[in-house]
Image (cartoon, rainbow, N blue to C red):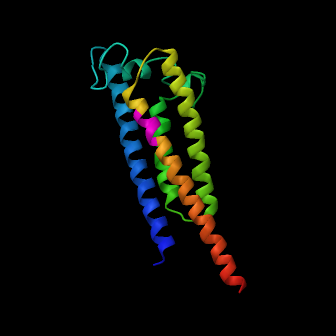
Amino acid sequence: MTTIKKSIRKLNTAIITTCIVGFAVSYYAYYVELAKEEDDLYEAVCDISEHVSCTKAFSSEYGKGFGIIPETSLLYAPNSIYGLTFYLLVAILSISNKYVTSALVVTLGICANLGTLYLAYILYKLSNICVVCVSLYVVNAILLILAVKKQRKLYRNNGTNKKKKSK
């Protein structure tokens, strides 16, 4: 096995591991949101103080549909559902070592990080720190870095293969 293939395999493992972490944290966010809806007295582990509270963020108007999708829409769902879907999709797509699929993963990573900036601004606006949210912001940043590294390796490897074939 070539060093490039080993390197790509390691990146795939890192991407999938990062997606598993993101999926688990998103699932916890979903669990907290459901528990709070069922029991108003429920106190999550991530609720540390008045200004450090994940349930405050999840129960805000921005906790579902990112605060931009109308309640009447079929897409109006807790943000954690979007997170679960995103991490699952990226994990599945990252199994492929095709350049186009890798470019799609990078594009999804960029979109996730743009969403991160938007939601971080919302937290600032709410005067709140959400430990779960910030954890997912870090996961998204790591995921984008790994996806870009993989795409660059695939691009270099593809260029190397074309040079070998033309000789």
Q: Nearer the viewer, residue 60 or 164?
A: 164
Q: Examine the residues drawn in magenta and state their main secondary structure.
A: helix
Q: Residue at x 45, y 33 (%)?
A: 80
Q: Nearer the viewer, residue 83 or 147?
A: 147
Res 65 seen here? no
Name the quadrant of the C terminus. Answer: bottom right
Q: Residue at x 36, y 19 (%)?
A: 52
Query: Outermost residue toward the right?
Result: 166
Q: Which residues are magenta?
A: 135-139
Residue 132, image quadrant: top left
For residue 31, side relative to residue 94 (left or right): left
Residue 159 in the image: state x and y as whole percent.
Answer: 66, 71
Q: Nearer the viewer, residue 74 or 23?
A: 23
For residue 82, side relative to residue 167 (left or right): left
Q: Indicate whether residue 136 is drawn in magenta.
A: yes
> On screen, 24 above or below 92?
above
Q: Nearer the viewer, residue 162 or 38?
A: 162
Q: Indicate whether residue 144 is drawn in magenta.
A: no
Residue 39, image quadrant: top left
Residue 110 in the image: state x and y as whole percent.
Answer: 59, 43
> On screen, 87 above or below 72?
below
Residue 54 in the image: state x and y as whole percent.
Answer: 37, 23
Residue 68 in the image: state x and y as whole percent.
Answer: 60, 23
Q: Residue at x 63, y 71 (%)?
A: 158
Query: Outermost residue toward the bottom?
Result: 167
Name the quadrant of the N terminus. Answer: bottom left
Q: How many marks?
A: 0
Res 37 seen here? yes
